Amino acid sequence: MGEKTEFRSGEKAPNAGVYMEVGEASFHTEIQDPKMITLERGETFPKNTNKDRKWKKKTKATVH
């Protein structure tokens, strides 16, 4: 089983890095000028712009 790649606000970051906001189905929903944050391991994800968005590590979010 692989590592979780999408996170909701309030969850803890598994690793340090830059995370960006993605749509509910990130490969279908492109967000113009997405919100980006830098977190250290164990820090809490902030609230999303809307309830249907999630946080994803930037390097994994741009695969599609």
Image (tube, helix red, strand yellow):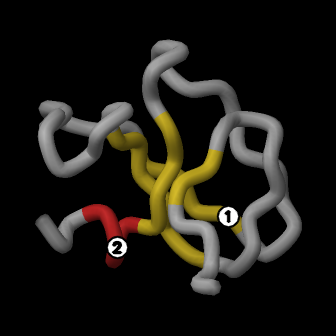
The numbered dot on residue 52 is none
Q: How many marks?
A: 2
Residue neighbourhood size for the residue with mark 2, other residues' Cα within 10 Å, grouped as few (<14), some (14–19), many (≥20): few
62 with respect to 43 (left or right):
left
In the picture, the quarter occupied by the C terminus is bottom left
Assign a secondary structure to mark 2: helix
Residue neighbourhood size for the residue with mark 1, other residues' Cα within 10 Å, grouped as few (<14), some (14–19), many (≥20): some
The residue that mark 2 highlights is 60
Residue, far top: 50
Vertical relation: 53 (above or below) 58: above
Residue, far bottom: 1
The numbered dot on residue 39 is 1
Vertical relation: 58 (above or below) 48: below
Vertical relation: 2 (above or below) 10: below
Q: Nearer the viewer, mark 1 or mark 2?
A: 2
Residue 28 in picture, x, y percent from top left: 13, 40
Find residue 46 and report its image quarter: top right
Instruction: Look at 56% across and 76% down and name the residue there.
Output: 17
- Mark earlier in primary sequence (1, 2): 1
12 with respect to 20 (left or right):
right
Instruction: Look at 47% across and 57% down and name the residue there.
Output: 56
62 with respect to 45 (left or right):
left
